[in-house]
Image (spheres, helix red, strand yellow):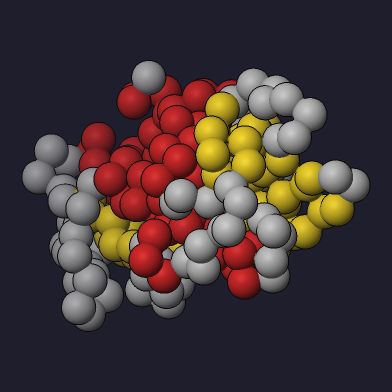
Amino acid sequence: MTTTFFRHAVRGLAMLSCAVALSGCLTMNSYVDPTLPQVAKADIAATANPRPVQVAFEFRTKGSANAAATAELQPRAVAVAAESGLFSTVTREAAGPDAGLLTVVIDNVPLDGENAAAEGFGTGLTLGAVGSMVTDRYVSTMTYSRDGETTSVDVRHAIHTTVGNHAGPDGLTPMTPLEAVHQVIDQIIWNGLDQLADRRAFE
């Protein structure tokens, strides 16, 4: 599942992995963009009367549904919703007449322009002497619906990935691409819930 997810969910990074295949000594590191605020349970306004919620999650790659990535990442969305304390119960299935529906759609727009694959290929040909860095962008819409009321918020995030002899962004911690994707998904969900709570969507 991890290999399939990596190949499909992070399409731009996967194309860069072609460079890695050309030389076993190439290094590939990912860095989570620091722009999005760090949000935890303590930062979110509590709900006086938590109700059940159904979480509907979909991951897309350049606008197209990505079933493998959805299956890999949906449990993370459900786990964050449960940890938030905003809901009495959290399920993936219909949760009853009193329940709300939290819909999360995250779209991976993986390329800085259309030259990422060519840059990665060039890195491989130079055996890493000339490195490259590309940015994967993640655009999310989170919607909460209950009793005929619907509230939507948008969250944007990014991952920067280096291949070969290229320095990473200053002050950021290198990690594997999959670790970076997991962290980005968690941060997107936390930020979306925080924004929805600020708009009193759960009251």
- Whether 108 is drawn above or below 38: the answer is above
Q: Quadrant of the C terminus?
A: bottom right
**Looking at the image, which residue is at 49% across and 36% down?**
78
Judge left or right: residue 124 versus residue 51. left
Judge left or right: residue 3 versus residue 107. left
In the image, 2 versus 143, the foreground residue is 143
In x, y percent, where is residue 187? 42, 58
In the image, 89 versus 174, the foreground residue is 89
Q: Quadrant of the N terminus?
A: top left
Judge left or right: residue 146 versus residue 159. right
Which residue sits furthest left? 25
**Looking at the image, which residue is at 28% across and 45% down?**
179
**Looking at the image, which residue is at 61% across and 64% down?**
197
Is there any visible trace of residue 181 in the rendered image?
no
Q: Quadrant of residue 128?
A: bottom left
In the image, 71 versus 189, the foreground residue is 189
Numbered disc total:
0
In x, y percent, where is residue 10? 46, 42
- Whether 39 is drawn above or below 89: the answer is below
In x, y percent, where is residue 178? 32, 41
Q: Quadrant of residue 135?
A: bottom left
- Whether 180 is drawn above or below 73: the answer is below
In the image, 164 versus 4, the foreground residue is 4
Is there any visible trace of residue 184 in the rendered image?
yes
**Looking at the image, which residue is at 17% across and 41% down?**
23
Which residue sits furthest right? 148
Judge left or right: residue 20 versus residue 98. left
In x, y percent, where is residue 50? 58, 47
Which residue sits furthest bottom? 170
